[in-house]
Amino acid sequence: MPTVAQPTIVFLHGFAESREVWTEFTRPFPSAYRLLAPNLPGHGTSVGPVPDFSMEAQARYVIEHLGRRNATEPVLLVGHSMGGYVAHQQH
């Protein structure tokens, strides 16, 4: 019987928040899951200028982040507030 790959779950924070909002929420997940909670551009410890704060630009950043982290499918996006809008751009 083939094994089913556990998804990579990406947690996207809201406006004026950071990845840390997900810390307590993600602790109970089994280690079989790959969890990612990036700081979106302009938030948390992200660095560098942010010329475009649009949801589309934030979504492009998430895709690039997944590529840098070698995330494989399936990928599930979980968003809070602005993070929900960013996740919606991926559908």
Image (spheres, rainbow, N blue to C red):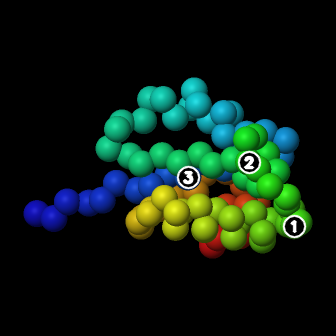
Q: Is residue 81 above or below residue 86?
A: above
Reading the chain from its start, which is encountered first: label 3 or label 2? Answer: 3
- Which of the two residues, 71 or 78, is positioned nearer the viewer here? 71
Residues at marks 2 and 1, CA–CA distance in whole angstroms: 14 Å
Q: Residue at x 26, y 60 (%)?
A: 4
Foreground: 65 or 49?
49
Q: Is residue 82 above or below residue 68?
A: above
Q: Amino acid at mark 3?
A: Val
Which residue is pictured at 66% across the width and 40% down the height?
Answer: 19
> Type of residue at label 2?
Ser
List the residue tagged with mark 1: 52
Seen in the image, is 44 located left or right of residue 63?
right
Which of labels 1 and 3 is toward the front?
1
SS category of the residue bearing label 3 = strand
Question: Which type of secondary structure does the marked residue at label 2 adopt?
Answer: loop
The mark that comes first in sequence, 1 or 3, is: 3
Instruction: Name the residue beneath numbered marker 2.
Output: 46
- Does residue 82 appear in the picture of this structure? no
- What numbered label is drawn on residue 68? none
Of the 4 image quadrants, the one containing the N terminus is bottom left
Residue with the mark numbered 3: 10
